[in-house]
Amino acid sequence: KIVAVIGAVVDVQFDENLPPILNGLEVTGRKPRLILEVSQHLGDNVVRCIAMDGTEGLVRGQEVVDTGDPIKIPVGPETLGRIMNVIGEPIDERGPIPAKHRAPIHAEAPEFVEMSVEQEILVTGIKVVDLLAPYAKGGKIGLFGGAGVGKTVLIMELINNVAKAHGGYSVFAGVGERTREGNDLYHEMIEGGVIDLKVRRFYT
């Protein structure tokens, strides 16, 4: 049962069988579903969790059940062009996602021996990026800028070019994005024909 709620942080007490860290818990009798993810064991059979949605209306004493697994989301070709929230539920009003497989949202990083040591440039097709700040294949890079300067436009262009030039897949995770911006980006992708070019979007 819930013993404390502090914003998105929820403390849950179990009588026995403490769930492991990263397991998903579900608050019973809550509509829409509220999933909690175990992040810490506090002792005295209490676990500290992060709520995957708003915690408005939660009260101490509410029952919580352990799902027995980490949070898993649909994966595979069926997810192409779909929008889902952080727990894998479709939010694009296009019905359920008929995926055959689901994968945990947490995974171990690949071993160094599995990673390529060759340095190769990813040609984005955006001249200013390719000239001044080229992207390395298989690497990570940040795209920094102030509000309203066109970062999202660049991302959409990157997704478009990667799909057309490389036949690749793109995953867009909107973390902390305004809902309006995510909605605008989605509809711009549809209008530009980008969403049909094997684009996956996750929006939280």
Image (cartoon, rainbow, N blue to C red):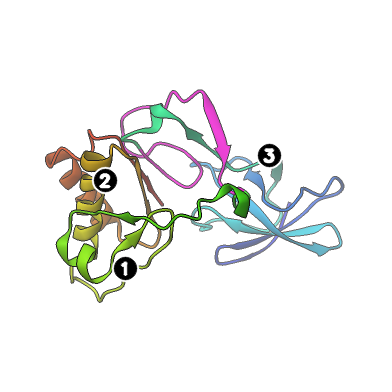
User: What is the x, y in percent for residue 50?
Assistant: 60, 59
**Crowdedness of circle 1 by 10 Å Cα count: few (<14), some, many (20+)?**
few
* Amino acid at the residue labelled 1: Leu
- Residue at x 21% of width, y 59% of height: 154
Q: Check disc 1 and report the residue beneath it.
A: 143
- Residue at x 54% of width, y 51% of height: 115
**Crowdedness of circle 3 by 10 Å Cα count: few (<14), some, many (20+)?**
few
Q: Earlier in the sequence, mark 2 or mark 3?
A: 3
Magenta stretch: helix, strand or loop mostly: loop
* Amino acid at the residue labelled 2: Val
Question: What is the secondary structure assignment of the residue under circle 1?
Answer: loop
Residue 141 found in image quarter = bottom left
Q: Which mark is residue 69?
A: 3
Question: What is the secondary structure assignment of the residue under circle 2?
Answer: helix
Q: Which residue is at the front of the view, 99 or 55?
A: 99
User: What is the x, y in percent for residue 37?
Assistant: 63, 52
Q: Gap in Å between the C-alphas at discs 1 and 3?
A: 34 Å
Q: Which residue is at the front of the view, 98 or 6?
A: 98
In magenta, the rendered stretch is: 83-107
Whether the residues at callouts 2 and 1 have beta carbons within 8 Å, the answer is: no
